[in-house]
Amino acid sequence: NAGVTQTPKFQVLKTGQSMTLQCAQDMNHNSMYWYRQDPGMGLRLIYYSASEGTTDKGEVPNGYNVSRLNKREFSLRLESAAPSQTSVYFCASSFDRSFGDQPQHFGDGTRLSIL
Amino acid sequence: AQSVAQPEDQVNVAEGNPLTVKCTYSVSGNPYLFWYVQYPNRGLQFLLKYITGDNLVKGSYGFEAEFNKSQTSFHLKKPSALVSDSALYFCAVRDDNYGQNFVFGPGTRLSVLP
């Protein structure tokens, strides 16, 4: 049972470089999310996709873009990385965002360091 | 606005003793409340949720949580802690109004000492 798969697991970038974080889920979920986790701050929502073909900003979208490629895949792009974007990034999915009683399923994260 | 607080950064408990991890919340409507656990280098795993009904909800690995509407709290409990319960615990809340996203607390690190 793969669940939510994130690639890569680790990445080191230089300031100004770009990269795309990949996420795929095999649970036929409609909704997908990108979070960042920083010490003492919990998880903060970057972007989400309520359903295939839609994306919306979360709490901290600046410096990021997303693409919902299909129902399974939701990617996060850093166009010009900054040291403030050093963090652990988590992708999650849920059956349908409109049903708030459904839990989210998380990948194991991408640990990103920007020098 | 929605918010959630976990007042303790760290909770230490001896193996075999009961444990409590605290969570308080603020929403404008009725709350959907969740607890997740995170082990090192892993993503968050769902433990239990409160949506409606019985104030005491039971979840995975022997954990339970008590919803208290008057105190706006949803504390996580376990009668007898195991060393393997040592992890980071997150409380999350969402207002039951349509269109809201979940808000996560800052996390509480639980250490169970042998």
Image: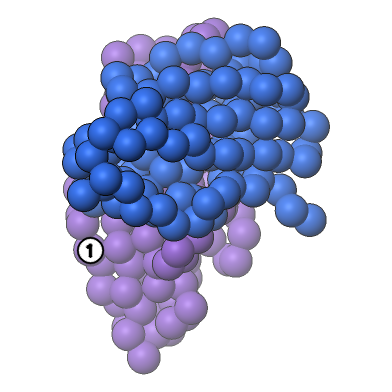
Three-letter amino acid code of the residue under disc 1: Gln
The image quarter containing residue A71 is top right
Nearest the eye: B102 or A57 = A57
Nearest the eye: B11 or A64 = A64
- How many marks are shown on the rendered structure? 1
Chain letter matching colour purple: B
Nearest the eye: A112 or A89 = A112
**Residue B78 visible to the viewer:** yes
- Residue located 26% across and 34% down the image: A16
- In the displayed structure, B58 sits above or below A48; it is below
- Residue located 45% across and 64% down the image: B41
Chain letter matching colour blue: A
Q: Position of residue B40 (x, y in %)?
A: 43, 67
Query: Is A112 positioned to the left or the right of A21 in the image?
Result: left
Query: Is A74 positioned to the left or the right of B114 in the image?
Result: right
**Chain of the residue under label 1:** B
- Residue located 20% across and 55% down the image: B8
Residue at mark 1: B10
| Mark 1 surroundings within 10 Å by alpha-carbon count, few (fewer than 14), some (14 through 19), many (20 or more) | some
Callout 1 secondary element: strand
Tell me the quadrant of the picture where the N terminus of chain A can be found. bottom right
Q: Position of residue B26 (x, y in %)?
A: 30, 24
